[in-house]
Amino acid sequence: MLRPAGLENGYFAMICLAYQIIRWTRPRAGIGLNRLNYDLHCHSSISDGVLSPALLVQRAAEKGVDVLALTDHDDVGGLGEAAQAAAAVGIGFVNGVEISVTWSGVTLHVVGLNIDAGNAMLQAGLADIQLGRRERAERIGLELGKHGIPGAFDGALRHAANPRMIGRTHFARFLIEQGVCKDVRSVFKKYLVRGRPGYVTHEWTALENAVAWIRAAGGQAVLAHPGRYDLKGKATRRLLGEFRELGGEGVEVVTGSHTPDQHALFAELANLYGLTASRGSDFHAPGEYGRELGGGPELPVKCTPIWHNWRLTSARRTRAASKTVPN
Ligand code: AMP
Ligand code: MN
Ligand code: MN
Ligand code: MN
């Protein structure tokens, strides 16, 4: 570094030290100046996103994401392709998954980060959920048929690039294609939800299973978009307590479906329950649902980001971590 003329050695060293202290202690959550943009929740065509894993990663890089986790619903089949694409474009990549759960009669989503996608326990669990999805999709098709919409199961399957992972979004895209609704948002108002045509109940796996599989695969369990659940009164707090007890580590504070009030609320609750905070867009398709990749505010400064110790704890996190080391 060039030394400005006329400054004493000690004076210059002090300025350098102060500069380093500011860099080392600056809040790291989020994407401010000199910080990284972590997007730890998004979907490819391996679940209900529309972009292939490689195209998704390319788009993430274009949108300024520094570290991306691909978190397809109940399937890890896109992680290899996404990791390769991330290496090619030079962004950090984290193996993820979003597991469907039933807890106290309510559907929840649990994200696993830094998972070993080859773990046998995780793979067996996901295979079970996929069988359940298929059977549920057949029932959704029958229900829509009863309401005068024939061929929905086959139609939805045509929209599912991965036949193992068929979900309501594929039905939504079929209904749009048929001219029944104009967009995904209106489908989820008029169809496929409780009290509407095409709704069926379904028992997903238990919360303890999802957390156990993620942990068995060496990952960290994160409660996805807690503001979206149909939980009354103290149930959210009971859920956070139970999740922590089971070995859950984090909660999504900033996610595509949270309002600014919910960012503040879940930052508070994360701290109260000893959980770290995660940030993700829940991107599915350009202009469709969730945010754009990398979009949304920074984590509130009071949060401990789930990535705060990634460089210390896992070789698999080296890539992401190498970007977090101040230099
Ligand atoms: P499934 O896991 O098959 O029940 O589908 C859940 C998926 O449906 C979510 O991950 C979203 O992609 C989509 N979804 C749920 N609710 C809505 C909504 N209100 N608007 C748009 N998409 C939704
Ligand atoms: Mn989805
Ligand atoms: Mn979800
Ligand atoms: Mn999601």
Image: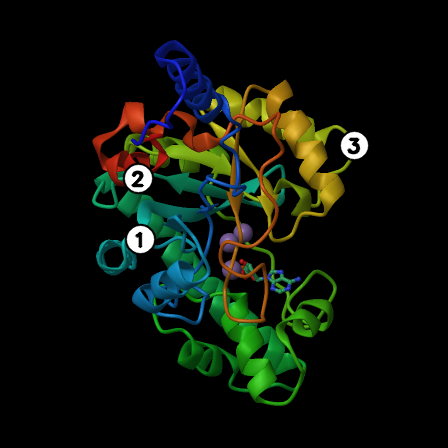
**What is the quadrant of residue 261 in the picture?**
top right
CB of mark 1 within 8 Å of CB of mark 2? Answer: yes
**What is the quadrant of residue 13 in the picture?**
top left
Disc ID at residue 233: 3
For label 2, the crowd category at 10 Å Cα-Cα, with few meaning under 14, some 14 to 19 and many 20 or more, is many
**What is the quadrant of residue 236 in the picture?**
top right
Q: Earlier in the sequence, mark 1 or mark 2?
A: 1
Residue 295 percent location from the top left of the image: 56, 55
Residue at 48% x, 36% y: name it: 222
Q: Does the rendering let one see residue 90?
A: yes
Determine whether, in the image, residue 44 is placed left or right of residue 230. Answer: left
CA gap between label 3 and label 2 equals 33 Å
The amino acid marked with disc number 2 is: Ile
Task: Identify the element where label 1 is drawn.
Answer: loop
Q: What residue is shown with label 1?
A: 76
Residue at 52% x, 71% y: name it: 286
Residue 136 percent location from the top left of the image: 49, 63
Examine the rendered structure and indicate whether residue 79 appears above or below residue 198: above
Residue at 21% x, 45% y: name it: 118
Residue 19 percent location from the top left of the image: 45, 23
The C terminus - image quarter = top left
CA gap between label 1 and label 2 equals 9 Å
Disc ID at residue 115: 2
Disc ID at residue 199: none
Q: Which of marks 1 and 3 is nearer the N terminus?
A: 1
